[in-house]
Image (tube, rainbow, N blue to C red):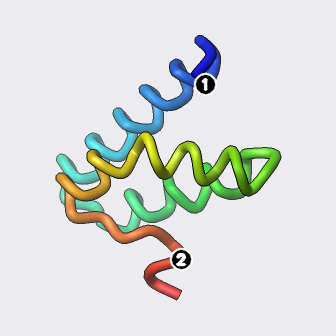
Amino acid sequence: MNSNLSFLFLCNQAALRAARRLNDYTLAVRVLAAVKHKVPSASLYATYLEHLNPTITELGIDTPEALA
């Protein structure tokens, strides 16, 4: 993963942790929805989810696809 994607990945991971720290599950799911909306391709979104999966699992967050 290049440095730009690594930075964005860390920012998104921090946003997910902050949302759960505030006990705002809806915001955590919206962060993931915003990532899906902003990435230019489905393969890049899949890469994000792959790298965020340990954090998503640890925090008990469902992806927008899992909720639909």
**How far from the left and from the top, in percent, is residue 67?**
45, 83
* Position of 51 relative to 6 (above/below): below
The amino acid pointed to by label 2 is Glu
Asked where in the image residue 52 lies, by quadrant, the reply is top left
* Position of 44 relative to 29 (above/below): above
Q: Dot 1: few (<14), some (14–19), or many (≥20) neighbours within 10 Å?
A: few
Q: Residue at x 46, y 37 (%)?
A: 12
Numbered badge on residue 40? none
Q: Are marks 1 and 2 in contact (CB under 8 Å)?
A: no
* Position of 40 relative to 2 (above/below): below
Q: Dot 2: few (<14), some (14–19), or many (≥20) neighbours within 10 Å?
A: few
Q: Residue at x 71, y 51 (%)?
A: 43
**How far from the left and from the top, in percent, is residue 60?**
21, 64
Disc 1: which residue: 5
**How far from the left and from the top, in percent, is residue 24?**
28, 61
Q: Quadrant of the N terminus?
A: top right
Looking at the rendered structure, the secondary structure element under dot 2 is helix
Question: 53 and 59: which one is in front?
Answer: 53
Numbered badge on residue 65? 2
Q: Residue at x 59, y 12 (%)?
A: 3
> Is 9 positioned to the left or the right of 5 in the image?
left
* Position of 59 relative to 67 (above/below): above
**How far from the left and from the top, in percent, is residue 49?**
49, 51
- Considering every residue shown, the one lying at the far bottom of the view is 68
Whole-number angstrom distance, CA of label 1 to CA of label 2: 22 Å
Q: Earlier in the sequence, mark 1 or mark 2?
A: 1
